[in-house]
Image (spheres, coloured by chain):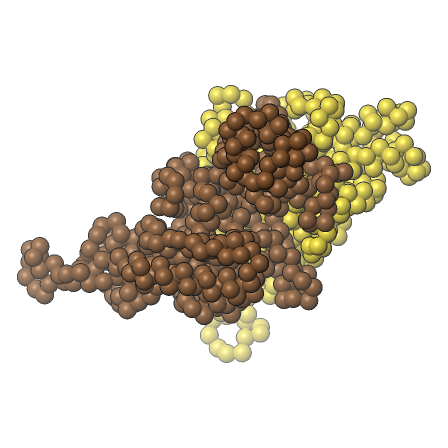
Chain colours: A brown, B yellow
Amino acid sequence: MTEFFGLPTLTGMQMPTGVHTLVRRTHEERVMRALQENGAMSRGELARVVGLSRTTLSEITGSLLQRGAIVVVDTDASSRAGSGRPAERLALDPASAQFMGVDFGHRRVHVAIADASHEIMASDSVRYDDTASWPTRTELALGLIDRLSAEAGVHFGALQGIGIGVPGPYPAPEGTAWSRAAAGKTVLRPAPEGVDVAFAERFDAPLIVDNNTRLAALAEAITGADSVADLVYVRLSDGVGGGLVVGGQLVTGSTGLAGELGHVTVEPAGRPCRCGKRGCLETVASVPGILAACWEFGLRLESLQDLAAAVAGAHPVADRVLREAAGALGRVVGAATMTLNPAKVVIGGDIARLAPVIVEQVAATLAGELFPIAPAGPVVEAARLSDDDGALGALAAVFHSSPLLARYPETAEVKGGSGARTSTTEGAVHVRP
Amino acid sequence: MTEFFGLPTLTGMQMPTGVHTLVRRTHEERVMRALQENGAMSRGELARVVGLSRTTLSEITGSLLQRGAIVVVDTDASSRAGSGRPAERLALDPASAQFMGVDFGHRRVHVAIADASHEIMASDSVRYDDTASWPTRTELALGLIDRLSAEAGVHFGALQGIGIGVPGPYPAPEGTAWSRAAAGKTVLRPAPEGVDVAFAERFDAPLIVDNNTRLAALAEAITGADSVADLVYVRLSDGVGGGLVVGGQLVTGSTGLAGELGHVTVEPAGRPCRCGKRGCLETVASVPGILAACWEFGLRLESLQDLAAAVAGAHPVADRVLREAAGALGRVVGAATMTLNPAKVVIGGDIARLAPVIVEQVAATLAGELFPIAPAGPVVEAARLSDDDGALGALAAVFHSSPLLARYPETAEVKGGSGARTSTTEGAVHVRP
């Protein structure tokens, strides 16, 4: 277990550890940031702007040129006032991918590739059967990356980081490395069946692997003009997952299981849950749980689309079932809010957008749980990123781990993809020095 | 609002900010640590041990001597092998206080003063009426410090930090600086009525002010051989308060209200709570709530002592009421555990020690809430520090803020005071670089 800028990563991969490497990466990022903001610049101009010596700057630009992150575009011969040898002007290589986000869902993998300015250069997904093995899923992902790379003319010579989201939780079988590690309280399980190893063999860049719901929570926290440092995220889909951002950091918990709001008991005598308990929030607020409750009241819906139609038609059974589910969700979120005092509560999953009554009811139930005398409670809203935007969560984790973004949430941002999410990130709080 | 080693502190005080100051303080701590571990040393020996140049070391020792943190004890003339001028040997001044913890309770203030090795040099408390004004409480605290200083022959010339715990939460009145700040989501309210200012005027040392329950949570996390980075703490007394340690950090929340587990609703139609809601955990699990429930079942107890006697006599009503209160507490802690996945749950307050049934029942209820398939849940235990040890929580916050202790929980420790709490701190997790 080593550390990559504060986030745990897995062993067996090349990754930049140590102060020297961190400093070098910080210099590289500052150089690239300067080129992004100012366009083409000479080495002399760069050295002044980023405050490095000419010698150090030459080392940095040499490495970046060699890896293809930047290119020589011209010389300053035409604009130059004085005499002497014209200086080369450097610019970002528009074909150089800097960050990659990969989101493995139950039935598709989504890949997004971003440049130095965090703009999405290429993005797509590939479907697979939910019984597909992890080697198959990994192969499909790598094939998708090859195709995106060829189509968009993108290269990975200067890749700064890869974020990989996997479904969770994956309690490890007895006797595995993870279960042994968990006994000693080491956090974060390995990616399923070598996903991490396959990416590490293929790309020379640090990896961050985490639960995709947790990564989505981070993406919601740093996305938009009102980025926050304390956020509770719950996603309603086939199951109910969650993620927490506390003081600007993703929370993993002592054995990697933090954020499992879907398995808080809401009905002690309720339906059996796939986790082995009864009456978990997931049994009433997941899409299958909501559909089952509609059936109990005689409304025979088969799918999320049917439910959306019933909501659009203001069907009273659908409304009642959704309000009850959201009421249970609101009580769980209410307890989490009293515990964590977040600035924002985000309800993810397509159903939260299809049925606005969910967010309304969660906000109403939550309001009854807050201190009557305290400052205003958290903002409650539907997720900005859709379930198909999973790779943006993984990208967010990589952006977040970047040394230049250490003062997150002031500077972190996610651009591009579906929906409006360019960020100016005002009102940041809890920033650690 | 400025920052002191990652913890927010209040404005208007002298405090070391900036890299230069941080580096100087780190050097000072390393020098003092070396003297603590090795006894008296010459400047040359010190320079070798801490890896500083002779010039830098002379600056550091000059400042420490001037402030009285260290003293010249002798020269190495007798043990010296070679010729030349004998070198002075330096040692810690045993009379120099390095850290101070102050805990303002509802009815007493507790002060503890520690030396460079975190040993308690002096400690005592003074009682006041719970209607005493904050200026009165502050004056009593400063008088107590004067007395302790005189009796123990302690001086404060080299004080490195003061931790101050105050009861909470204190929602700020409308229009105050804090309520304005809270609207902008700045954390941490000021200490009540100028406590912070009074200490800042009196001592030339950085201050940390926080809710005393939260400081107790930190002290529990870093105390003992099994220090943890993720902890949920609940204290049962006149009210029910709580504190969270997540990833080794105290959690304040977006408006300073994190950890208020006592105000999670457990009985929607229950008794009115002083917070303005109904059926909060506090109404059933605080000492007054437990006594009231005993009365309802015909067991007329007046005080915690009466309750302890009923527990000692195995009174069935007391047992039943305590189990029900602990069951409610267990459900709240269970939800917090599913949310945060802590390594340890600590139940504080004298009642948790007087009535072991509480911890037993919380553990039993909590066990039913955990994933059946996941690695073992958190340790559940009664607090190691008593309510009278409040100042140790405040001390823990100051130790924790020290640059040398930044790799908490590996190195942090609290020694002395009541109970066994010398720490060797193995098995640390979630350490951030």
Judge whether residue B252 can be spotted in this image: no
* Residue A235 spot, x, y in % from top left: 55, 42
Q: Which residue is drawn at 55% across and 35% down?
A: A307
* Residue A87 spot, x, y in % from top left: 14, 62
Residue A148, quarter of picture: bottom left
Judge whether residue B277 can be spotted in this image: yes
Horizontal side of residue B295 vs A177, given as left or right: right
Residue A21, quarter of picture: bottom left
Horizontal side of residue A11 vs B212, given as left or right: left
Quadrant of the drawing holding the N terminus of chain B: top left
* Residue A6 spot, x, y in % from top left: 49, 56
Q: Residue at x 55, y 60 (%)?
A: A132
Count of marks placed on residues? 0
Q: Which residue is drawn at 69% across and 64% down?
A: A174
Say above or below: A186 vs A342: below
* Residue B7 spot, x, y in % from top left: 51, 43
Please state which of residues B278 and B159 is positioned toward the viewer in this rendering.
B278
Say above or below: A17 vs A120: below
Please state which of residues B346 and A234 is positioned toward the viewer in this rendering.
A234
Q: Residue at x 39, y 61 (%)?
A: A145
Please state which of residues B178 and A258 is positioned toward the viewer in this rendering.
A258
In the displayed orientation, state which residue is furthest to the bottom: B82
Say above or below: B394 vs B115: above
Horizontal side of residue A49 vs B395, given as left or right: left
